[in-house]
Image (cartoon, helix red, strand yellow):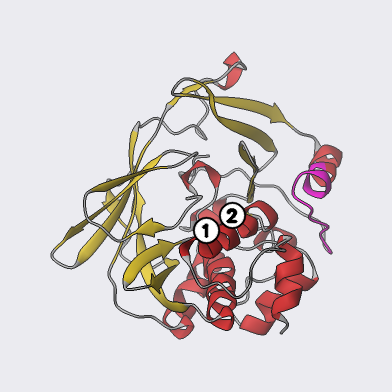
Amino acid sequence: MDIEAYFERIGYKNSKNKLDLETLTDILQHQIRAIPFENLNIHSGESMELDLQAIFDQVVRRKRGGWCLQVNYLLYWALTTMGFEATMLGGYVFNTPANKYSNGMIHLLVQVTISGKSYIVDAGFGRSYQMWEPLELISGKDHPQVPATFRLTEENGTWYLDQIRREQHIPNQEFINSDLLEKNRFRKIYSFTLDARTIEDFEAMNIFLQTSPASVFTSKSFCSLQTQEGVHCLVGSTLTYRRFSYKDNVDLVEFKTLNEEEIEEVLKTIFGIYLDRKLVPKHGDRFFTI
């Protein structure tokens, strides 16, 4: 695997030697704007691999995206290859309908330490929940960012990531009650501990998430990609674009329903994805918001 190929994939041409917060932020932002958060393999007859070489081939060589276990594993590899002090962590995602965190460790995130300060870096949550900057591990501190304000709190060794969101304006009134819309201004995202993990810790969950009828990832096909001003999301055949802060404390969310030909074209033009197999778009009944 070639780190220069990774830099080319994310369009990164800046410093590769300074192991500072500015470089870390730059790498994160380039990755989330180049590599989609997506699960399209599941809905086009392929598997979601956890082998690092397979991930590199999929994301870098074939210019695809992936879900958190893949894109954050790739990010971890890139950062450690550059020389950053990085550790993989495991997260428990908040289930809004059930009002609790997942029983299983279903999310991979990365901790990076720079000059004695620790940061959480996550390129694999996507949609409007995606952080755009590393979050310093300070309990109770608000981190205002373009997508929203993020907050980390710690209780008895467990950390919680929450989000304080803006109001949202939906011009397409027929979508005002869409199940894709986040209804809460305060949103719990996930919990985690600082226990170091290896990719082997996620192997069983990786299989479960892409095979179980109870998984949101088998229920819905999705793809999201950050831009300079917002985020594109494709869920099933519904395309949305959220522009952050299009006016004071309000996001603009635009919806469009696509036909089969339009979906293929949107994947190419907006997300840069060319699938080898036919996609079967799916918008199941599992909770998933944009």
> Where residue 252 sits: x, y (%)?
56, 24
Q: Main secondary structure of the magenta part?
A: loop
Q: Quadrant of residue 269?
A: top right
Can the viewer see residue 57 in this picture? no
Q: Quadrant of residue 37?
A: bottom right
At x 65%, y 27%, the residue is 255
Residue 82 lies, with reference to residue 255, above or below; the image says below
Question: Disc 1 marks which residue?
Answer: 25
Q: Please tell me how crowded label 2 is: few (under 14), some (14-19), or many (20+) other residues with Cα within 10 Å.
A: many
Give yes or no for contact between labels 1 and 2 (Cβ–Cβ under 8 Å): yes
Q: Please tell me how crowded label 1 is: few (under 14), some (14-19), or many (20+) other residues with Cα within 10 Å.
A: some
At x 27%, y 69%, the residue is 193
Q: Secondary structure at mark 1?
A: helix
What's under tag 1, amino acid-wise? Thr
Residue 247 lies, with reference to residue 76, above or below; the image says above
Residue 108 lies, with reference to residue 259, above or below; the image says below
> Where residue 276 sits: x, y (%)?
84, 64
Circle on res. 29: 2
CA distance for labels 1 and 2: 6 Å
> Where residue 29 sits: x, y (%)?
59, 54
Q: Which residues are magenta?
A: 266-276
Magenta includes 36? no
Q: Is residue 164 left or right of residue 121?
A: left
